[in-house]
Image: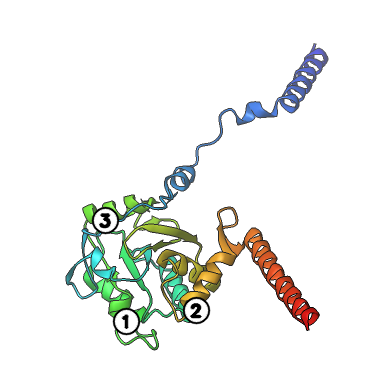
Amino acid sequence: MREAGRIRFAVVAFLALVWVTAHPLSLEAHPVYDPQDDILKSIGVDEKLGGAIPLDAHFRNEKGDEVRLGDYFTGGPVLLTLNYYTCPMLCPLTLRTLLGTVEKLKGVDLARDFRIVTVSFNPEDRVETARARAGEIHDVMEGIPDPAARWPFLLGDERSIGALTGAVGFRYRKVGKEFAHPDVLVVLTPEGRISRYLYGIEQDPLDLKMALIEASGGNIGKSTALNQVLLFCFQYDPVGKKYALYARNIMKAGGVLTIALLGGLLLVLWKRGRR
């Protein structure tokens, strides 16, 4: 009897193993719940290209003065960064890296052509913390006569913060004492409309320059003619999230140049023939 029981148990175990092997998805029907999944789903960016930001929203700068967001839109494009000033690592790294990229731009100058505006999405951030974070950046901004005017650090209440983050589609979530949030740079036109989103901790200088030129319609920098050439040759690739040479326009330009050269050659030959 014991031997028969062992055989019966072995047969049942074998059949169970065969069934599980043939139906692996049955084990996934009830996956283990991971709270990290909810966090990852709740943060991100819902792009709203062409949308307007609330220029009438009121904030305070790192000095404690009340300002309007629209005060910083005075003729040039604006780079908007959304961070929080008590962030221990990611936000300071992102801001320092952005400054390093800006210093590599050629033909476009922070002191003259555009602004950067950093806004804290944490309504509990204090003026003292904003001032300290601003000082870390302003102290190393070389060649900028008034760093606070070209790169202000703002903080606000829940209403102002919510209006701004909602307008640009910025989703974040508080996790313990810190925040989980996307790393994105929002490029705004001089009128306060969303022109482009650039993602990641580090930006390519070419991408940043092209985004600024695009947002301004080519009306910044030392040469507006060169800007128009760049806008003609480069276009933003939404899949690769980068600016790349636009082959069709390059071919058009090459065709026009070829026709012009042939026309010039025929004109020279025709004049020689008449002589």
Q: CA distance from mark 2 to mark 3?
A: 29 Å
Q: Residue at x 71, y 71 (%)?
A: 263
Give the labeled residue for mark 3. Answer: 54
Label 1: element kind: helix
Q: CA distance from mark 1 to mark 3?
A: 24 Å
In the rendered view, would you say 163 is above or below 188?
above
State the residue lying farthest toward the front. 274
Give the labeled residue for mark 2. Answer: 105
Label 3: element kind: loop
Is residue 8 left or right of 32 when viewed as pictured?
A: right
User: For this rendering, which residue is in front, 272 or 106?
Assistant: 272
Q: Residue at x 33, y 75 (%)?
A: 151
Q: Residues within 10 Å of mark 2 (few under 14, many from 20)?
A: some
Is residue 56 left or right of 26 when viewed as pictured?
A: left
Q: What colour scheme does the image use? A: rainbow
Q: Say which quarter of the image contains residue 273.
A: bottom right
Image position, residue 218 (x, y; %): 45, 70
Give the labeled residue for mark 1. Answer: 147
Image position, residue 81 (x, y; %): 38, 65
- Does residue 175 appear in this view? no
Q: Amino acid at mark 2?
A: Leu
- Does residue 64 appear in this view? yes
**Mark 1 or 3 closer to N-term?**
3
Q: Residue at x 54, y 36 (%)?
A: 32
Label 2: element kind: loop
Image position, residue 85 (x, y; %): 33, 67
**Mark 2 or 1 closer to N-term?**
2
